Amino acid sequence: MENAVPFQDRMAAAQKAKRESDAWVRGQEQARNQLNTVILDCTFNSGPNHPDPSTSEMVQKFLKRVIVPAPAGKAIDPSGTDYIATVQWIRAVIQELPDHPKLGDPEKALQRVRDNFAAQAEAKNRPNKHDGW
């Protein structure tokens, strides 16, 4: 009995899957290395050249708790974090923060980011009404 897929095609598919897996791991490792830098670079001032360490620390502590889980079987460490997505979410939250955040502002910013990402995912999955015309 012969296989339905020729050997060369199976090998090519396996090599492609390996390359994609290796690229995923490299990207995750790079993002993991960037994560703390992105968080620690998020600082705030109470005025010109006047750092506000308490606000910066409050926001940084919140950002350290933002974690996006990795897809099943794709985690590169026991934490199960998708570091690429986590860095993207943290950057989006930072963009949503006001210039002088107060207690509760990071949570509100995260909720806006969640809503934006959910709307983008819904729009991506929604069929185009012009398809099939």
Image (cartoon, grey):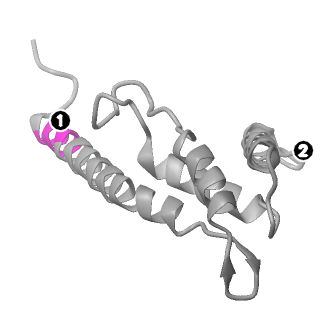
Q: Position of residue 49 (x, y in %)?
A: 68, 87
Residue under numbered circle 2: 129
Residue placed most toward the observer, 131 or 117: 117
Residue sitting at x 80%, y 38%? 126
Image quadrant where residue 72 sits: top left
Q: Residues within 10 Å of mark 2 (few under 14, many from 20)?
A: few
Dot 2 amino acid type: Lys
Dot 1 amino acid type: Arg
Residue sitting at x 39%, y 56%? 31
Residue sitting at x 57%, y 47%? 61
Residue sitting at x 45%, y 51%? 84
Res 10 label: 1
The kind of secondary structure element at disc 2 is loop
- Stretch of the chain drawn in magenta: 8-14
Left or right of 27, for residue 11: left
Q: Residues within 10 Å of mark 1 (few under 14, many from 20)?
A: few
